[in-house]
Amino acid sequence: MNRRRFLGQTVGTVAAMSPLGMGLGRAADEDPEVMGQGKFRFKREKDWSFKRDGSAVEVADCHEFVRTRSGSLILCTTNTANNLIEFSPDGRVLRTFGTTYPGIHGLTLSEENGEEFLWITDTNRRIVIKMDMKGKEILTLGWPKDSGKYEAENRFCPTETAVNPVNGDVYVADGYGSDFLLHYNAKGELKNAYKHEGFQCIHGVAYDARDAANPRLLVTSRAANKLFTLSLDGENLGHKDFPGAWICRPVIHGEHVFFAVINSGRREWGSDFRGFVMVLDRNNEPVSLIGGQAPTAGAEGEAALYRNLDPKPFLNCHDVCLDAEGNLFVAHWASNKTHPYKLIPA
């Protein structure tokens, strides 16, 4: 099915069948500063940034967030003065740590016996690191030579991890390398390495327990504009197509999945910021495009995915995180050292 036909059918179906109905586009019409539709409508909190002692903390490329059990957020940035920044939702910097991760990219939080751990991927050093919340490195996973899947070490470049909270198994997405999804046990021993047709820059992986009796993996194939669902053993259970939407990692929040869409409908990279945030329902169908055009019947091509705002709503958005109050934080890559944005429900 070609891109235009898909969008005419899928987006039109969402508009017609969604409980949000045909009023999806009303928010922007009523208030041009409101982005999103239905239950997921937000306004940017202007001039928000995180500070310490009244001064802004410097960032570089801001890649991903996690939210801790205490309610604070941790951001990873490629600035080696402070690779990891923990801050409160109101912008107070609680601490900074990590200075040896020039290519820090993925950030995942896991819990073992009541203790939290961070998993990071570094695309410069081409490694995965597990650390405790004090920054002590516990485990390092590098080039999986013994898998027999790689011709050379430089063909491995991990972008993301997911951790099974039940048995501690670790899944590593080799998104900037050879597009294998690597499956390790809790000790870091390789169990499997596989990829499926359509894996093209598998940028993110997430453990999906929305169906608690039947947990799955969600894998984003960013360059192919696809979201895959896999069994925990790697069986391909199908995928959703989102033509033109370069989706980063899946962020599961309650019954919904959030994505930063780093760009829409183009393959060029640069300063023509055309990203938005996509929200999917329990069936992985879009219900809101925050900073994008509302799904409407008859929309075709990029018109179904992107609303050309000036100024653009986001700057190469790369990840999202929600706090306990439902505020949405958006991180940006290649954005001239811009702090994340904070969006408040509208």
Image (spheres, rainbow, N blue to C red):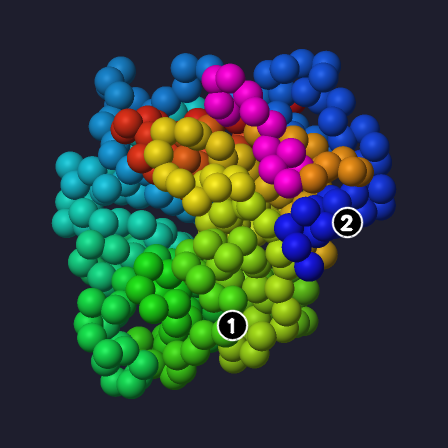
Left or right of residue 55, residue 50 in this image: right
Location of residue 27 with respect to 154 vertically, above or below: above
Q: Position of residue 241 (x, y in %)?
A: 62, 56
Name the image quarter holding the N terminus: bottom right
Answer few, some or many: residues within 10 Å of disc 2's Cα (few below 14, many 20 plus, some between 14 and 19): some
Q: Position of residue 113 (x, y in %)?
A: 41, 65
Front position in the image: 104 or 137: 104
Magenta part of the chain:
301-313
Name the residue nearer the viewer: 191 or 296. 296
Q: Left or right: where does residue 237 sit relative to residue 99?
A: right
Q: Quadrant of the C terminus?
A: top right
Q: Residue at x 36, y 29 (%)?
A: 271
Is residue 94 found inside the magenta-colored segment of the image?
no
> Relative to residue 27, is residue 104 depicted above or below?
below
Identify the residue at horizontal 16%, vertical 41% (top origin): 80
Q: Is residue 63 above or below residue 175?
A: above
- Kindly report the distance in space between the C-alpha atoms of the residues bearing marks 1 and 2: 24 Å
Is residue 331 visible in the rendered image? The answer is no
Q: Is residue 256 left or right of residue 141?
A: right
Quarter of the rendering containing residue 28: top right
Q: Which residue is mark 1?
A: 197
Residue 9 is labelled as 2
Q: 246 and 214: which one is in front?
A: 246
| Mark 1 or mark 2: whose residue is earlier in sequence | 2
